[in-house]
Image: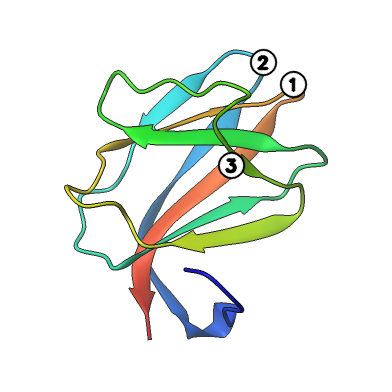
């Protein structure tokens, strides 16, 4: 979603935590019907993420989630089944939650 978004208006349905390091890691996204994907980076450095199938890999050219932020988006058509993440080296537990914007 573009523009301001009130986190209180997001109802998570299911999620997954992904330990991101200097090597691309991936996890399966929950199989739920959702209209919003929330990515949370509680770490102290950027996490770079990519969405796709079971072979998806993230690079430092992937979408950037700044430290200490939430990023909300509408899942792409065909709903990706996996998320991948990578950092510059520090281990950060990225949280991906699927849910509804209420």
**Is 51 on the left-hand or right-hand side of 25?**
left
Q: For the residue labelled by badge 3, is the local secondary structure a helix, a strand or a loop?
A: strand
Tell whether label 2 touches label 3 (CB within 8 Å): no
What residue is drawn where x is 76% and y is 47%? 67
Position in image of residue 89 (x %, y %): 75, 18
In the rendered image, which residue does mark 1 sit on?
A: 88
Position in image of residue 76 (x %, y %): 29, 51
Position above or below: 100 against 55:
below
**Is 58 on the left-hand or right-hand side of 31?**
right
What residue is drawn where x is 36% and y is 62%? 74
Q: For the residue labelled by badge 2, is the local secondary structure a helix, a strand or a loop?
A: loop
Position in image of residue 50 (x %, y %): 45, 34
Which label sits on residue 22? 2
Tell whether label 2 touches label 1 (CB within 8 Å): yes
**Is 11 on the left-hand or right-hand side of 89?**
left
Residue 90, picture quadrant? top right
Classed neighbour count for the residue bearing mark 3: other residues with Cα under 10 Å, few (<14), some (14–19), many (≥20): many
Q: For the residue labelled by badge 1, is the local secondary structure a helix, a strand or a loop?
A: loop
- Report, in whole angstroms, how far the alpha carbon at label 3 lies from the one at label 2: 13 Å
In the rendered image, which residue does mark 3 sit on?
A: 94
Classed neighbour count for the residue bearing mark 2: other residues with Cα under 10 Å, few (<14), some (14–19), many (≥20): some
What residue is drawn where x is 34% and y is 74%? 100
Q: In which quarter of the image is the C terminus?
A: bottom left
């Amino acid at each position: 979603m573009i523009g301001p978004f009130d986190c209180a208006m997001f109802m998570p349905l299911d999620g997954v935590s992904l330990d991101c390091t200097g090597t691309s890691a991936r996890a399966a996204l929950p199989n739920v019907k959702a209209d919003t994907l929330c990515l949370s980076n509680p770490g102290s450095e950027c996490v770079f993420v990519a969405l796709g199938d079971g072979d998806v890999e993230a690079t430092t050219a992937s979408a950037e989630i700044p430290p200490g932020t939430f990023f909300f988006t509408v899942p792409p058509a065909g709903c990706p089944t996996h998320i991948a993440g990578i950092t510059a080296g520090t281990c950060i537990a990225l949280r991906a939650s699927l849910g509804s914007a209420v």
